[in-house]
Image: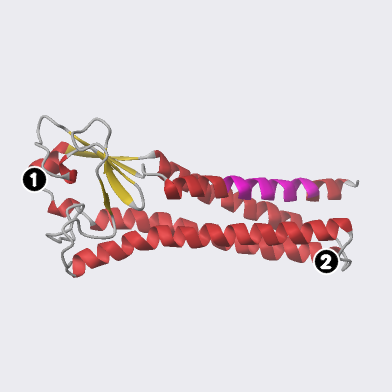
Amino acid sequence: MRPREKAWFALVSLGFVFALVALVLGLLALTGNNWIVYQVEPAVVRPAGLSDVSRRRGLWFECAAENTPLVGECSSLFESTLKCPLNDNGNSIIHSRMLVPFMQVAVLVSLFTTILTMTTITVLLWTGSISCGYRCGQYVMVIGGSAIWMCALLYFVTIILQYHTLTTENYLFDPYLFSLRSTWLPKVRNATTMWIGPEMAMALATYCITFLSSTSFLAAGSLVEA
């Protein structure tokens, strides 16, 4: 095997490994419930609702922490706990919250489909089941790498949107959406500390590793000779 072929094989292998790692991390981040951690000082706030106790928030639910009187209680991030109609501010927040996980699902499905397609075509080329020359391998790497690059870009957009949603919750007010920081009583806001959870780090790692996968495939495509 010539040095160029060894480099091609190494880059393609890295691309697939990076993509699989990104898929696993992306799924863990999507289903985890530790994107945001709210720590409330129990000596200051008397628990009357979920927003008065320490809790953990994912992309789908917000749940009370294990060391609180409301342990096990969760509420959906996509509706009011009172089942009341929301105003424009509340609906705007709900739509932003819903967009993040649904976009991530679409990105991860697209990434999986791209990898599966690339794997199938690469195996067929390697075994000689498809005989269309080295250019076919180059096209697969370039087109697949470009598609994965788009997946990385869209996934990064979901992370930015998540931060944007958290920011807008500070000033968009809806009296029936208690998970908004703007609806909390002043003493609750002062007693609450927000931490970035491990799932946010997983999401950032997913973006970076997906980008590395794309780079590996595009680099492999540049090594193919006619």
Q: Which of marks 2 and 1 is nearer the N terminus?
A: 2
Q: Is residue 184 magenta?
A: no
- Report the residue at 24% width, 58% height from top: 168
Q: Is the magenta stretch mostly helix, strand or loop?
A: helix
Quarter of the image where one finds residue 17: top right
Question: Which residue does the numbered mark 2 point to in the structure image?
Answer: 135
Image coordinates of residue 94 in percent, x first then y, are: 28, 62
Residue ID for mark 1? 186
Neighbours of disc 2 within 10 Å: few (<14), some (14-19), many (20+) = few
The x and y percentages for residue 110 are: 57, 62
Residue at position x 46%, y 58% in the image? 104
Q: Nearer the viewer, residue 134 or 51?
A: 51
In the picture shown, does residue 158 fall above or below 44? Answer: below
Q: What stretch is highlighted in magenta?
A: 9-22
Residue 79 position in % (x across, y down): 25, 60
Q: Which mark is residue 119?
A: none
In front of the other: 65 or 143: 65
Q: Position of residue 84 (x, y in %)?
A: 15, 64
Give the Cα distance between marks 2 and 1.
Answer: 65 Å
Query: Does residue 110 appear anywhere in the picture?
Result: yes
Residue at image location 10% in from the left, 36% down from the top: 45
On the picture, is 176 further left or further right than 23?
Answer: left
Q: Which residue is drawn at 63% across and 63% down?
A: 146
Q: What residue type is labelled 2?
A: Arg
Residue 136 sits in quarter: bottom right
Residue 224 can be seen, yes or no: no
Using the image as rendered, state which of residue 186 and residue 90 is in the foreground: 90
In the picture, measured across the screen, residue 85 lies left or right of residue 157, that is left
> Which amino acid, by three-letter code, is at mark 1?
Pro
